[in-house]
Image (spheres, rainbow, N blue to C red):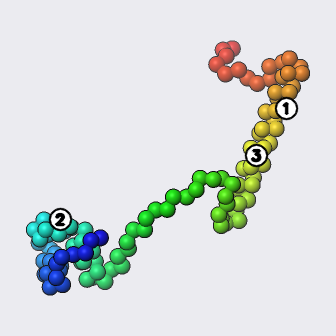
């Protein structure tokens, strides 16, 4: 957030005006020429609430070979998925070989009517 040009006394007056309950953050912001989010920040600080500032989101690399510190169950599931994909590839290769050698269509043709 930008630094405010308002003095501490002006900030306290705006906070007090909000706490009376007559005006909203947006109306106070337009009245005093201050961003309403800044007024919300001031009020939150005044009331002792924890104000979190958003951290910029970091882009993660989409490289599947890079494994980060994942829990062991996630690593185990990833290994099982890798094995299942390999098994599926093996079965498809076996079907292809059997179709070539036996000259029989083993896979069901999609869209055929019975």
Q: State whether residue 12 appears in this view.
A: no
Residue at the image point whose x is 67% and y is 58% from the top: 66
The reply to whether the C-beta atoms of the residues labelled 2 and 3 are less than 8 Å apart is no
Residue at the image point whose x is 21% and y is 75% from the top: 4
Disc 2 and disc 3: Cα gap in Å? 56 Å
Q: Which residue is mark 1?
A: 94
Q: Which mark is residue 84?
A: 3
Looking at the image, is mark 2 or mark 3 earlier in the sequence? 2
Which class describes the residues within 10 Å of circle 2: few (<14), some (14-19), or many (20+)? some
Residue 95 % position (x, y): 82, 29
Residue 45 in the figure: left or right of residue 68: left
Which class describes the residues within 10 Å of circle 1: few (<14), some (14-19), or many (20+)? few
Q: State whether residue 69 appears in this view.
A: yes
Which image quadrant is residue 87 in? top right
Disc 3 and disc 1: Cα gap in Å? 15 Å
Does residue 27 lie above or below 112 as drawn? Answer: below
Could you tell me which secondary element the residue under label 1 belongs to? helix
Does residue 45 lie above or below 89 as drawn? Answer: below
Disc 1 and disc 2: Cα gap in Å? 68 Å
Q: Which residue is mark 2?
A: 26
């Amino acid at each position: 957030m930008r630094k405010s040009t308002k003095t501490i006394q002006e900030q306290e007056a705006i906070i007090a005006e909000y706490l009376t309950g007559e005006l909203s953050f947006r109306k106070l912001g337009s009245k005093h020429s201050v961003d309403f989010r800044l007024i919300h920040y001031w009020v939150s600080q005044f009331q002792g609430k924890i104000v979190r500032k958003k951290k910029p989101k970091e882009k993660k690399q989409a490289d599947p070979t890079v494994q980060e510190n994942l829990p062991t169950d996630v690593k185990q599931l990833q290994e099982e998925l890798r094995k299942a994909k390999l098994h599926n590839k093996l079965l498809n290769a076996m079907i292809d070989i059997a179709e070539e050698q036996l000259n029989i269509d083993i896979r069901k043709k999609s869209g055929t009517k019975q």
